[in-house]
Image (tube, rainbow, N blue to C red):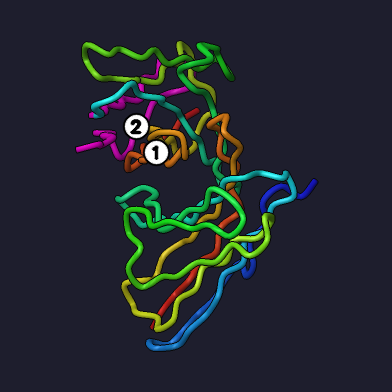
Amino acid sequence: NAGVTQTPKFRVLKTGQSMTLLCAQDMNHEYMYWYRQDPGMGLRLIHYSVGEGTTAKGEVPDGYNVSRLKKQNFLLGLESAAPSQTSVYFCASSTSSYEQYFGPGTRLTVT
Amino acid sequence: AQRVTQPEKLLSVFKGAPVELKCNYSYSGSPELFWYVQYSRQRLQLLLRHISRESIKGFTADLNKGETSFHLKKPFAQEEDSAMYYCALSRGATNKLIFGTGTLLAVQP
């Protein structure tokens, strides 16, 4: 099992460009999450999903959109990137048993 | 407001010394608390959770509801314990996590 994978690992965008981050899990987990990690701020929840076809906002959803068309995939989109979105993005998945399994992260720089 | 506080950004100890990483929380309900660890160049992973009351890699953490704390302890630090440690609080059935800002543990030889 690959667990949780994220694509791409690194990306540099210019202000105003758009991109999609892909998260995939092969553990048949119902719940999936997107976090951003910034220095001195820990991880903050952007959006999450409790099942295929459902999404909900987390703590810092502005500027991001998500989709969960398939149970194993959770996509995070940036429609118009801003320098404030420079961060490391982590995807995670879980069942109802509380432990979250994290992906390796995507380092995004917006210039 | 729901919050997790880790007051120390960096904790530096010598090998063999005791370690205590502090975590305080504020939550109106019955908390589910966790410690996650991120070793260098590895992904974030669960270290332990309070409901299991187990010791992992020599680490323990006790939930103190009176002091709203969930400090992580180890009696004798090892160099391989050097990592970033995050305390986290789970909110409700959807298992959304609130993370603290993390403490970098550096164990010196």
- Count of all numbered marks drawn on residues in the image: 2
- Residues under labels 2 and 1: Cα distance? 6 Å
Counting other residues with Cα less than 10 Å from the Cα at mark 2, is it few (<14), some (14-19), or many (20 or more)? some
**Residue displayed at 53% across by 57% down:** A54
Callout 2: chain: B
- Determine which quarter of the picture holds residue B92: top left
Residue B88 in view of the camera: no
Q: Which mark is residue B51?
A: none
- Amino acid bearing label 2: Leu
| Chain for numbered disc 1 | B
Picture residue at 74% right of the left edge, 50% below the top:
A26
Residue identifier under label 1: B104
Q: Residues within 10 Å of mark 1 (few under 14, many from 20)?
A: many
Residue at the spot 68% in from the left edge and 61% down from the top edge: A70
Say if A99 sits above or below A80 in the image. Answer: above
In the rendered image, residue B32, in percent from the top left (x then y), is placed at 41, 25
Element type where label 2 sits in the image? strand
Q: Residue B98 lies in what quarter of the image?
A: top left
Residue B17 drawn above or below residue A46? above
Residue position marked by numbered label 2 in the rendering: B11
Span shown in magenta: B1-26
| Callout 2–callout 1 Cβ contact below 8 Å | yes
As drawn, is B90 to the left or to the right of B48?
left
Local SS, label 1: strand
Q: Position of residue B34 (x, y in %)?
A: 45, 28
Q: Is residue B22 above or below residue B104?
A: above
Q: Position of residue B20 (x, y in %)?
A: 36, 20
Disc 1 residue type (three-letter) = Leu
Residue B7 colored magenta?
yes
